Amino acid sequence: MLASKTAEETRKLQLTGGSTYIVSLPKRWIDQNHLKRGSIIRLREEDGGLLSIMPTAVAKQEIQDEALVRATSKDSPDQLIRKVVATYLIGYSLIHVRAENQKPLSAKQRHEIKAFSRRMLVGTEIVKDTAEELTLQVLVSYPELSVQSALRRMTIITASMHRDAIAALKCHDFQQAKEVINTDDEVDRFNMYVVRQLKTAIQNPRIIKDIGLEKARDCLGYRLVTKSVERTADHAVAIAENIMNFQGRIEEKTLEKLESMSNIAVSMFENAMEALLRQDYVLAESIIEKTEDVIAIEKQTLTFPNKMQSEEVARLRLIIESIRRTAEYATDIAEIVLNLTVQSILTPT
């Protein structure tokens, strides 16, 4: 019998029926988990040859089930949305938004929560919609959209946003710039989905492989990566917002330098994400070495014609800064890849 939760004991592996191996379980553990003859237990292989044994009741409890968000008439829609987002990120599969004292939710509260969940929460459906309660159910499961798949989608959208923003700058196209700003919601929704998956995996390491990762330590690296991707998209939006307020035209030579700087930065970003998804140490290292190229072009681009108004110069400087920040985030991602894949280039001692 085990003396404490941290005590260990050995048990003999026995052969029965000529082909089945069995091992007895501690009675204290059986009693503690209210098991009896015929009870179903769950077995799972872990890394390093370990085997986990769980009562089915415990296995079910590992999945966050229902959360209740209480609402009052004083709560703004934004306050309630923040609570819904928090419960979504933690990993709850059913989220109830219920008015206190059986009073109805306001029309504005209901409309804003429904619009936000449909727009921003991946895999979420509204399964109950009454005056007193909204219930959101997260239907998507891990294999259907892995962390890598969501990150790849975020990468494609973010790179496209950045290229469209530069194209809008060249053509002075306000409508295209506005589309870049509107597209940011897509990146944000996938970002929240990835954060939800990673937080759930941290709470329950047994689903690490289900979400597409290899080890629990990968969660922190991927969390930092998804934040860098989201921030890169924010800088594409910043470029577009500055274009919307740009009145004059930019001379051709300056545009060529901006486009060249942008092409390098976006290429670095895409390659950094490819290095992550391929777990490629060498590719990640090559990206870091390109940072100097962006800095060199930035110095050349920061020379503006005297005829440009000071407000336009300020906006152009902000656009250049956003392009540089894109390259810096690519470098940050590449450095994370180096940390995740360093074992691949180490020589055994």
Image (cartoon, helix red, strand yellow):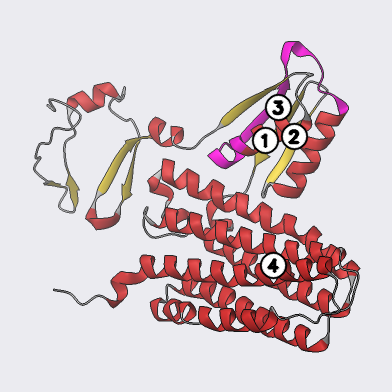
> Badge 1, how many Cα within 10 Å: few under 14, some, many 20+?
few
User: Which of the numbered marks, if any, corresponds to residue 78?
Assistant: 2
* Front disc: 4 or 2: 2
Residue at 74% across, 35% down: 127
Residue 190 on image: x %, y %: 64, 55
Give the Cα distance between marks 4 and 1: 25 Å
In-image side of 253 versus 196 (left or right): right
The boundaries of the magenta stretch are 86-107
Q: Quadrant of the N terminus?
A: top left
Q: Earlier in the sequence, mark 2 or mark 3?
A: 2
The residue identified by callout 4 is 157
Q: Quadrant of the C terminus?
A: bottom left
Task: Count up the numbered dots.
Answer: 4
Residue at 39% across, 70% down: 338
The residue identified by callout 1 is 82
Q: Earlier in the sequence, mark 1 or mark 3?
A: 1
Q: Earlier in the sequence, mark 3 or mark 4?
A: 3
Q: Are marks 1 and 3 in contact (CB under 8 Å)?
A: no
User: Which of the numbered marks, if any, corresponds to residue 97?
Assistant: 3
Q: Are marks 3 and 4 in contact (CB under 8 Å)?
A: no
